[in-house]
Amino acid sequence: MTKVETTTPVLQVKRISKRFDTTQALDDVSLDLYPGEIHALMGENGAGKSTLIKIITGVYHPDEGELWLDGNPIRVAHSVDAQGYGIAAIYQEPMVYPDLNVAENIFITHRRHGFFVNWGKMYRDAEAILAKLDVKLDVRMAARGLTLAAQQTIEIAKAISLNVRVLIMDEPTASLSAHEVEQLFNIARALRDQGVSILFISHRMEEVFGIADRVTIFRDGRWISTLPRSEITPERAIRDMVGRNLEEFFAKSEGERGELLMSVRNLSKENVFSGMNFDVYRGEILGFAGLVGSRRTDVGMALFGVEPADSGDIILDGKSETIRSPEQAMRLGIAYMTEDRRLIGLTMPMSITSNISLPMLHQYLSRLGLIQRSAEEATAEQYRERLTIRAPNIEQPVGMLSGGNQQKVMLSKWLNTRPQILILDEPTRGIDVGAKVDVHHIINDLAAQGLGIILISSDLPEIMAMSDRILVMREGRQMGIFDRDEATQEIILTAAMGQNGGTTEIA
Amino acid sequence: MSRRLQFLKSWEGLLLVILILVIGFNVVSTPHYLGLQNQINLFELHIEKIIVALIMTFIIINAEIDLSVGSVMGLAGCVMAYLWTREVPFGLCLLAGLLTGVLTGTFNGLMVSYVGLSSLVVTLAGLIGFRGFAHVLLEGNSVGNFPPWFEKLGQEPFIGPFPFAMVVFFVMLIIAIIVLQRAGAGRYVYVIGNNREVARYSGVNVKRVKMTLFILSGTIAAFAGLLMAARLGSMRGDTAQGTELDIITMVLLGGVSIFGGSGTMVGVLLSILIVLNLRNGMGLLNVTGETQTGVIGALLILSVLVPNIAREVRDAWSRKRRVQRIQEGEEPEGG
Amino acid sequence: MDTLKRHFRPEQLRELSLVFLIVAIFMFFGSQIEGYFSPRIFNRVTSDVAIITVVALGETLVLLTRNYDLSVGSVVGLTAFTVGKQLSANPDMLPLLALLMALGMGLALGSINGLLVSYGRVPSIIVTLGTLAIYRSILVAFPGNKIVVIHELPAWVVDFGRVQLFSIGELNIRPVVGAALLMFVLFQIVTTYMPYGRRLYAIGSNPEAARVGGLPSKRIVFMAYMTCGAMAGLAGFMFLVRYGDLTVVAAQGLEMQVIAAAVVGGVSTNGGSGTMIGALLGAFMINLLQQSLLRWLVISDFWVNALLGMLILVAVTIDLVIVNRLRDVWARSGLQIKPVDEEWRVKEKERHVP
């Protein structure tokens, strides 16, 4: 066990704050990490966990506060600095060199002593490190052919070879099988026993309770509590994570539920999600709740034909359809607004007008194939007014707008396809409160006008306020559908974490 | 973003300045430089290349590249010439030449769009392979003696003082400008080049667009090859060899980013004029063709290097301004 | 399946298949052509292969980092010509000096490439397309008559090619071949046993990880170009010695043969994988095929390039299929991997937005 109160903490986070544009990502948080402990950090999406990690590893710089190492303040200006201090981080998607073998992946960034690479020694040293982790891996195999879990192990081994003292693991288990998770935990325990300090971020309650020595909970960028495992229960944890901040959200007005628009039966995609069963009604908002890795986005992409499902039925208008392309989905009246604006949602250098008309461009073409600018612009103006998009003019490149306005442009783009079913993926992510309210109003109006809406969101209060029914997903599985009246934050979060009575089997 | 628009405007503005300088220099060193006949000659020598540069603009904006165009020009001409030596009716020879371009374009398009190979590698192989086939067909020989009407079309004025190829170029130029800047197809080309995934998610058929572009590229290159045969009056295995350098330079110099998604036809037109006038001027100063090519090569490198350096300077400057703003209490956007 | 994956890297399987192909070609043409197994043909093939191989070795260094060097043909031509001219003007010049001159020139020319690619951040295709033209134009701009004639060269140049280094039975190993073999061994050692060589693979395999991990990518790529240029310079010297009579189109188009050799030999155009052995085998196979087809009389000389183009495509497609197969195996364990260059492309696009 750990000798917590008797030694100096190896890493101290002292009153760190960080602000992004309009969001206070971290607000005066403090945390102590002792050598030889596994310290879990929990919290909802947006609680500030990733931001803290990035500050510790030098990707971001804090606006206020300090980091201390072994009782002395340090400055982590760059990821290379973090390496020098013995701080290493492992993420969900490991960064390995696919063409190099395991041993080389571990040692490639070392400052070389001597002219020649001693392969024999490298293999032996690699095996030694892996032995310390109690892992059997063929050090001669190319990293490319290895499983995600193995690649993560390589990253851990790399950290060990650089004499890591603080190992941060950011949601490392999201894509691992149960067996691989157990392996990872054995490694973590071995490291802990050797004095390494592990900061472990996870959503999964049973994991946290299985491995952590102490648990810290953040909420909305603030530190809430730090307790030894023995003093915390799942219920207490959930309560700390959720808090009571439902007030600021706009509640969806009660409306009439109309006809059945779409039925999804047993929709599955191998290794991604399985057994999705739900209905979408006119005038209703079906919320999709879940945590990171729950694969809600994948379901959306399947419904829109971007990454089609393998099996199951999507029934529209009484007919079962196989949706294999976005073109087809749009023809069937489905629209999907992606969660990522920058990479796949909008074309940043292009104007508002061009972005809005893109999916429906063929309708703005004259007989010769030329774009009818006036029609396009009329459309854009229409949406500018309707959604109150704030921009000097509609020719403004979208990249220059604020997050909230970009979101509105994206929304316009998809509304313009006149969908019957609108899938919104994180529509209020990264935008300020004012814009959020706007967007909520708009969504509400859309439902009132007769659209069927699927609202994917990691913002629990938002989902609860906006949805008529809430579908909860966990790791590609549907955990249940709750009616608005019966759902509380605790119930939703519990289902999302798989605590609702053991239907959870990790593949 | 208006900063970027400004910059782009200033790239075309810069091109205009350079063009004026080049022409000015030429006018000073050679009398009658601005005479119509000299200008026509200026175009004529390179007319096939600038025709291909028009379609190359689309391809590069689409974030692809076609290195095989020079070889397709040669191959199409050689196919035509080969059949001609075999006493095939000339019309069919021409048709076969064009078909060559369609086929090579389809091949390239298939490999890039559907097999998923990088266009760089595929068209590099095409550059080598198609040229090879051209050599195979004509071996070491030069083929000529085309029907008089063909050579007349290639060498004598067609409409007013302008030869056929020039007329074709101007017509294609206008079509290219209209399509790129005003047609739906043009916008698709930009969007795909800027961000292929956004296009896909917005329902654009990316594969079909790319396929079409490559087929067009091959066809137009073949057409240009035939025009070259008409102008030269003869065809050899190595005709049009090395022209891809000039073509790509003209496009990149015109402000089209090698990464795709940006650039204008006007910019390419300006850069075409610069390259032509540069070559013409050098030629009049008795600089050899090879040396001219070297200068063009330097121009190519500069056309990417200079914006890079400019961007570095601009970023450094804006970073300094950010630091200032932090110090003054404003919060910059994070991460 | 696992033991197979363990003991044979895909590259080694590929190299093995190349060896088989070479043997097959050998056997086939041996049965078709009179006097195929003669010392004369051996010399011919090995001398040609030697020149290509030397350049291919350098080019492979660059290819490993996910870059290209298309200017090597011009570098070979320029160095060969320059040294040839110098020797014609000063016949008493020390042979060693001539060699060093060639190497030095190549190094300098390669450094220019490296500077522009690494520090100017101009894509390597563009840089080397440009320097291909620039270097060739320097060659053409040479004052005086633009040829090197063999009888103006000192005697040792002519004899150099005929000297025997040593013999295996009836087969003579000439100096150029010896030099190529030496370089091959050196490069194989560097890429297998030296940290610098291994880092080349890392950079090509995952440029982003290399950057984040603190590898000095710019310096490493720069040095790769420098070395590639030096090798092209060495090949220029060998070219001069082999052919004697040079014109301004010397070695034009060589870069295509070199890249074809590397690609056929299994060097990935995407960087990160490929070996010197592969490059050597690729060069050997292509040249053997060329020479054999030439002598077979059924195919004319002009099929060479057509063949090269097809070979490149076949090699790259096969590699793609294999890689896709690997990715499938991977995917079956439940992973989602984006190709690294797609990310890079998006990030590059991001840079255009202020």
Image: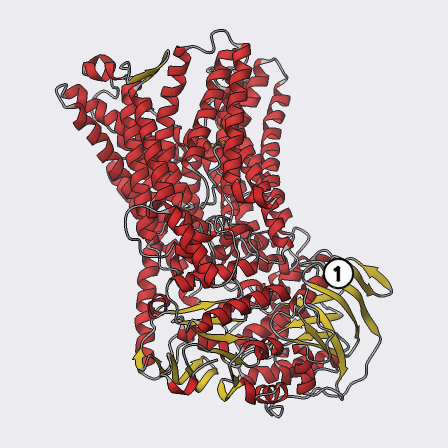
Asked which secondary structure carries label 1, the reply is helix
Q: Where is residue A26 in the image (x, y as percent from the top left)?
A: 46, 83
Q: Report the side of B254 relative to C108 (left or right).
A: right
Relative depth, front residue between B249 and A230: A230
Q: Can you say whether B24 is above or below A477 in the image?
A: above
In the picture as drawn, the residue positioned furthest to the right comes out as A318
In this rendering, would B29 be left or right of B78?
left
Q: Determine the image quadrant of residue A419.
A: bottom right
Report which quarter residue A477 is drawn in: bottom right
Residue in front for this viewpoint, A5 or A205: A5
Residue for badge 1? A331
Q: Which amino acid does label 1 sit on?
A: Arg
On the image, which quarter does residue C45 sit in? top left
Residue B145 vs residue C68, the one in the foreground? C68
- Vertical placement of residue C31 versus C255, above or below: above
Can residue C254 be seen? Answer: yes
Q: Which residue is drawn at 30% across and 21% down?
A: C247
Q: For mark 1, does the 10 Å Cα neighbourhood hold few (<14), some (14 to 19), or many (20 or more) residues?
A: few
User: The N terminus of chain C lies in which quarter of the figure?
Assistant: top right
